[in-house]
Amino acid sequence: MNEKSGAALRATIIIDPEGIIVSKLVNPLEVGRNIYEILRLLQGIQYGRETGQGIPANWIPGHSGISRDPKLIGRI
């Protein structure tokens, strides 16, 4: 809660089945949440766990991920 304005902050917390927090997003008062981005984030987390791949910026479901091998950094 923003004590000065009395307004509640909007937050999204994603917890995996093991009870581990995997994502915390807190939006500023001026910005609303985006359900499509939250859904993309969930899909990316699931895709990464299923494939072992990383999820690049602007990834969308149906696209491939990227290798997490540190030896490949700057080579692809």
Image (cartoon, grey):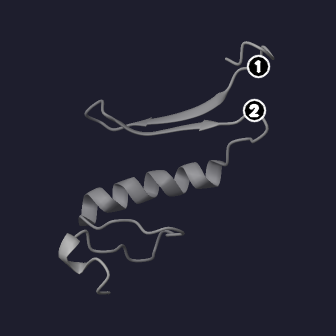
| CB under 8 Å between discs 2 and 1 | yes
| Quarter of the image where the C terminus is located | bottom left
Please report the residue visible at 18 percent of the width from the left and 76 percent of the height from the top: 71
Judged from the image, the secondary structure of the residue bearing numbered disc 1 is loop
Tell me where residue 43 sits by quadrant.
bottom left
- Give the CA distance from mark 2 to mark 1: 8 Å
Residue that numbered label 1 is attached to: 7
Residue that numbered label 2 is attached to: 29
Tell me where residue 52 sits by quadrant.
bottom left
Rendering coords of residue 61 (x, y %): 48, 68
Vertical placement of 8 versus 54: above or below?
Answer: above
Residue 27 is left or right of residue 55, and the answer is right
Rendering coords of residue 62 (x, y %): 45, 74
* Furthest-bottom residue in this view: 76
Residue type pointed to by label 2: Leu
Q: How many labels does the image show?
A: 2
Residue 19 is left or right of residue 55, and the answer is left
How many other residues sit within 10 Å of disc 1, few (<14), some (14-19) or many (≥20)? few
Residue 52 is left or right of residue 37, and the answer is left
Please report the residue visible at 35 percent of the width from the left and 62 percent of the height from the top: 47
